[in-house]
Image: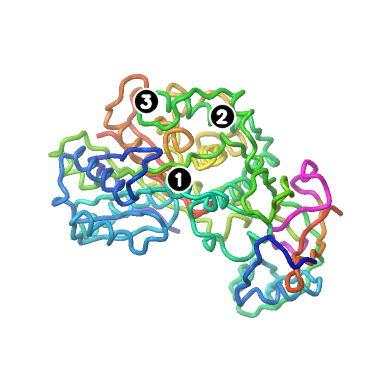
Amino acid sequence: MMEPSTHLRDKYALVGAGHSRLGKVPGVSAQGLLEEAMLNALDDAGLKTQNVDGLICRGPDEIYTFHQVMGERLGIDASFSTTLTNGGASQVMGVALAAMAIDAGMASCVLVGYGRDNWSRVHANKENHMRGSGRPQQMYGMEFGPEFGYYGAIAAHGFGAQRHMHDYGTTREQFGAISVAFRNHALNNPDAVMKKPLTMENYLAGRMIVEPFGLFDCSLQTDGAGAVVVTSAERAKDLRQKPVLIKGFGTGNNISGWFNGNNMTHTGAIQSGKTAYAMAGVGPENIDYAQIYDCFTYMVLVQLEDYGFCRKGEGGEFVASGALGLNGAMPTNTSGGQLSEAHVEGMLQVVEGVRQLQGIYGPERQVPNAEIGLVSGHGGNTVCESTLILGAI
Amino acid sequence: MSDDYAKAIPIPGPESLPFWEGAKNHQLMLQKCSDCAHHWFPPSTVCTGCGSRNIEWVASSGKGKVFSFVIFHKLYHKGWDGEIPYAVAIVELEEGARMLSNVIGIPVEEVKCDLSVEVVFEDATSELTLPKFKPV
C-alpha cells in the first residue's frame, strides 16, 4: 500500500507568484508572456534570475523541450529542469516536482511556470477556429473520433456532465451557479478578462455549443502566463513575502481512460486528494478555500465532490447553495477562474492559491481568516489530476 | 456511398486494421482475451483486464446501451455542415467494451443515457464503412 511521505510537509514554500498580461495580448509569444510572469514572480520574492537553479515549465505542446527554449531566453543554467506534458495537471504537478527536486538535493530555488498564446493563435485564422482549438488536428488522433464528428475537450467533458446528470439528477442550472459565482469573483479582480456581470438568465440564454454545455459552461480562450518560485521554508524566512507552505500534494491518473468504468463521474481527484490530504495531515473540513481547475463548469462540480467538500452526487445542490462565494461553505476560484479570469491551464489557480495566503487582498477578494487552501490541476484531456495543499506560516 | 465524402477519413493504426476490415464486411469486431474472456476497445496488443498477450478478434453482437452522449450544436468540421445538431455517443456493448460512435435514426432530443441501441453500418465511401448505432 502506497503511503505519501509526510516528511515533506511544511518543509518547502512558495515565496513568489506572478502572472503576465491576460486576455488578448497580441504581439508577444507564449515564451515572452512566460518571461513576464516569471520575472513578476521573482520580483514578488525579491529574487533574480541568477538565484534560480531549477526550471520546470510548460508552453505550447508542439514546442519540443520547452524548458530549453526558456532557459536560453532567460539566461539560466539549471541543475534540475524539465518540461511537463500532462495537460492542465502539469502546473500543480510542477510545484510538487519542484519540492521533490529540492528535497533530493537537485536544486535549491525552482521557477515553475506555464505560458500560452492560445487566443492569438486560435483567432489568427478561421480554419483553426473551426477545429475548436489551436492545436494541430493530428493531436486528436486519427481514428475513433473525428470520423464521428467528435472534436475537442468540450465533448469529452460533456460526456461526463451528461452521465452525472443521468446518475444524480444534476441540472444545467446547477452548472450555471458555478459560472455565475466565478463571474462575481472576477468582478472584484481588476486583471480578469470578463468585466460584465453574469446572471442565471444570461447563462441559460447562452447558445448551445456541445450539449449539455452552452457558451457559459466553457472556459475562456486567452493568452497569458503564470509562475511561482519554490524554495525551502528555511530560506523563505529571509525573502520579501510572507511564505506560503507546501503542506502536501498528490496526483491521480485514471489513464485507463475517461470512458472506462466510472472514471468520468469519479475522477482522478479522489486519489489525488487522498494522497495530498494524507501528506498534509488535514482533511476537507480543514480547507478554507479551493482553486479548482475549471475548463468546464462540470469539472468544478465533480472535483468538489471528489475532494470531499460534499458527498458524491450532491455537487449540484452544493454549488447552487451559494457555497462558492467568498463567505460560502467553500470559497472557490476567487480570481474568477478560467471561466471568467483567464485560461492559463491551472497556473493562475496556483498563483491565486498563493496570494490568498500571502494575505494581500482587500475584503472584496480576501477569503476571511484563510489558513489552508487547496489547488487542483486537471488535464491530459480529462484523466490526470494533481493537487496541492497550501498553508499559511 | 459517395465519392465527394467531406467528413474526416480515419487513418487506422496497425492494431486496428481488423476493426476497419470487419466494418467493411458489416461486422463489429472486438478484441477478446482468450484467458479471461474480457472484451475491450480501442485495440491494443494486451488484454486490458488481465494483461495477457493471448488475445483474439471476435464479432460483437452489435447490441448495447448509450453510456453517455453529447449533442454538437457547433460546426467544428465542414463535413458536418447541414447535419447540426448531431449526437456523438459512448456505446457500451453487451460484451462490456465501450466505443465512440453516432446515434442515428432518432431526433437528438430523444437520445438518452442507457437507451438500448444496435449497430448499423454506414458505407461512407468505397473504402470506408462506419459502425453507427440506432435505437432497438
Q: What stretch of residues is rendered in magenta?
A: B94-115
Label 3, secondary structure: give it. loop
Q: Which residue is mark 1?
A: A273
Identify the disc placed on residue A367: 3
User: Above or below — where is A179 with respect to A38?
Assistant: above
Asked if the magenta segment contains residue B106, the reply would be yes
Q: Tell me which numbered mark, 3 or 1, is placed earlier along the sequence.
A: 1
Residue A128, percent from left and from top: 52, 52
Residue in front for this viewpoint, B8 or A68: B8
Question: Label 1 amino acid?
Answer: Gly
Residue at x-position 72% and y-position 70%: B30
Question: Label 2 amino acid?
Answer: Phe
Label 1, secondary structure: give it. helix
Q: Which residue is mark 2?
A: A318
Q: Tell me which numbered mark, 3 or 2, is placed earlier along the sequence.
A: 2
Q: Are marks 3 and 1 on the same chain?
A: yes
Mark 3 falls within which chain?
A: A
Mark 2 falls within which chain?
A: A
| Cα distance between the residues tagged 3 and 1 | 21 Å
Give the foreground label among 3 and 1: 3
| Cα distance between the residues tagged 3 and 2 | 19 Å
- Circle 3 crowding by C-alpha within 10 Å: few under 14, some 14–19, many from 20: many
Mark 1 falls within which chain?
A: A
In the rendered image, the residue lying farthest to the bottom is B54
| Cα distance between the residues tagged 2 and 1 | 19 Å
Q: Are marks 2 and 1 on the same chain?
A: yes
Q: Quadrant of the N terminus of chain A?
A: bottom left
